[in-house]
Amino acid sequence: MKKILVLHTGGTIAMSADQDGAVAPTGQNPMAGFEKLFDNQLTIISEEFANLPSPHITPTVMLALKNRIQEAEATGIDGVVITHGTDTLEETAYFLDLTLPNNVPIVITGAMRSSNEIGSDGLHNLISAVWTAASDDAHDKGVLVVMNDEIHTARYVTKTHTTNVATFRTPTFGPIGLVSKHDANFFQELIRSEICDIQELVEPVFLLKAYAGMDGTLFEAINQPTTKGLVIEALGAGNLPPATLPAIQALLDRNIPVVLVSRCFNGIAEDVYDYDGGGVKLKKMGITFCQGLNGPKARLKLQVGLSAGKTGADLVNFVSNAVS
Ligand SMILES: NC(=O)C[C@H](N)C(=O)O
């Protein structure tokens, strides 16, 4: 019988609503006892790893989670399920994707409606995640996110709606598979990427979003002696307002890596435009274009690359391509 480790970390899936509808963490995890649904089919080992709303999750917690999973893998488990708040779920999922070798399937899930709300989706998502983690077909697909009967890759999935149960989407590429009753069905493969088994975190790495009329103020503010890196969510195909450029150049002059993604929901950042602030000029300045990742994930990739000791061309290669 396959052995699946379920690590609970908190989030709405572990919360309930009061009489006024306000949602908050509970003393006892409402998912407790779900294991009996798998009697005689799977061995489920549940562990309360944390009980945090996901805005409280930090890369330090993600690193501890990664270490816990590696420890469990050494004892012989067949798959891991993590329950997590949805606000930063994609970040924890991608962090684990970057730092854990594909030894066993690792699946993250959560809920958009807390445990006692009508139409609560937590238990259903948890069951789907367990069946996915137990699937022979879930190997070698990186860390997976299972929500609302869909299977997404950690690398490309993102939360797209504040409250809808169908919030998790994979722009441009779509989900990698679907869950139907007990089966995880996959329709796409994931190209392998480099894994960095880090033990410490280099910080701080910042993320700024570009907007019409942006100037250098925010870039100057983060140009501190301690600053290790910056990701910019740029406009369109990868362009910036010209007034930002002197302050960005000052960061580059200090050898602080500056990485650019697009703030668009679909598509990739490219050096297309050759006007002041256009992508062609930005690339010539030494800004690294990261293709296929959103801002929070590119920030994690830069942080993980720096934490793995990567510098220069090695760091640029690692960060610039989502599948490197
Ligand atoms: N649906 C959720 O889980 C949202 C919650 N605020 C969290 O991320 O912890």
Image (tube, rainbow, N blue to C red):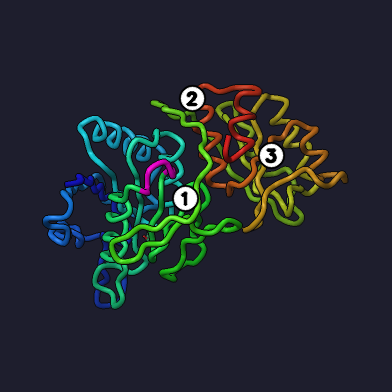
Residue to which mark 2 is pinned: 308
The numbered mark, 2 or 1, whose residue comes first in the sequence reads 1
Please tell me in which quadrant of the rendered image residue 313 appears.
top right
Q: Is residue 164 left or right of residue 172?
A: left
Crowd band around label 3 with a 10 angstrom C-alpha radius: few (<14), some (14–19), many (20+): many
Relative to 289, does residue 113 appear above or below in the rendering? Answer: below
Q: Main secondary structure of the magenta part?
A: loop
Q: Does label 3 point to a residue whose CB lies under 8 Å from ligand 1?
A: no
Q: Secondary structure at mark 3?
A: strand
* Of the pair 183 and 113, the residue shown nearer to us: 183
Relative to 315, does residue 150 appear above or below in the rendering? Answer: below
Crowd band around label 2 with a 10 angstrom C-alpha radius: few (<14), some (14–19), many (20+): some
Image mark for residue 153: 1
Please tell me in which quadrant of the rendered image residue 243 appears.
top right
User: From the image, which quarter does the C terminus lie in?
Assistant: top right
Q: Is residue 103 left or right of residue 318?
A: left
Relative to 205, does residue 150 appear above or below in the rendering? Answer: below
* Of the pair 62 and 193, the residue shown nearer to us: 193
Crowd band around label 1 with a 10 angstrom C-alpha radius: few (<14), some (14–19), many (20+): many
The numbered mark, 2 or 3, whose residue comes first in the sequence reads 3
The numbered mark, 3 or 1, whose residue comes first in the sequence reads 1
User: How many numbered marks appear?
Assistant: 3
Q: Position of residue 146 (x, y in %)?
A: 38, 57
Please provide the residue range marked out in magenta: 137-142
Q: Secondary structure at mark 2?
A: loop
Q: Position of residue 59 (x, y in %)?
A: 41, 39
